[in-house]
Image (tube, rainbow, N blue to C red):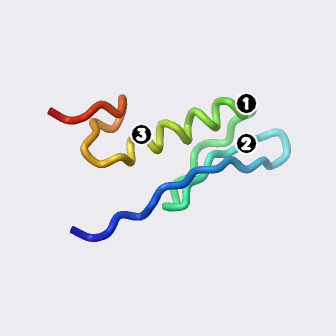
Amino acid sequence: MPDRVPHATSTAESGSFCTARCTCGWRGPARRARSQARTDAERHLAEAQPGTDGESGRPLE
């Protein structure tokens, strides 16, 4: 199995908008609310975890 790219998220502001970004290259949509951009980043991290269902972050059975 190839090595997985590590995921580290951050947010970046551009004018009135905030965007979540990840070191793997993923980028969330532009949001007016910083809290929503942070939520986008948290969801990305949960989906990126191996062995989870991708939406809730729960382990696969």
Q: Amino acid at mark 2?
A: Cys
Asked if marks 1 and 2 touch (Cβ < 8 Å), the reply is: yes
Marking on residue 18: 2
Q: Amino acid at mark 3?
A: Ala
Residue at the farthest bottom position: 2
Nearest to the observer: residue 21 or residue 4: 4
Residue at the farthest right position: 15
Marks 3 and 1, Cα distance to the nearest angstrom?
Answer: 20 Å
Q: Residue at x 33, y 38 (%)?
A: 54
Q: Residue at x 60, y 52 (%)?
A: 21
- Among the 4 quarters of the image, the one containing residue 6: bottom left
Q: Residue at x 73, y 30 (%)?
A: 33
Asked if marks 3 and 2 touch (Cβ < 8 Å), the reply is: no
Q: Which residue is mark 1?
A: 33
Q: Secondary structure at mark 1?
A: loop
- Among the 4 quarters of the image, the one containing residue 53: top left
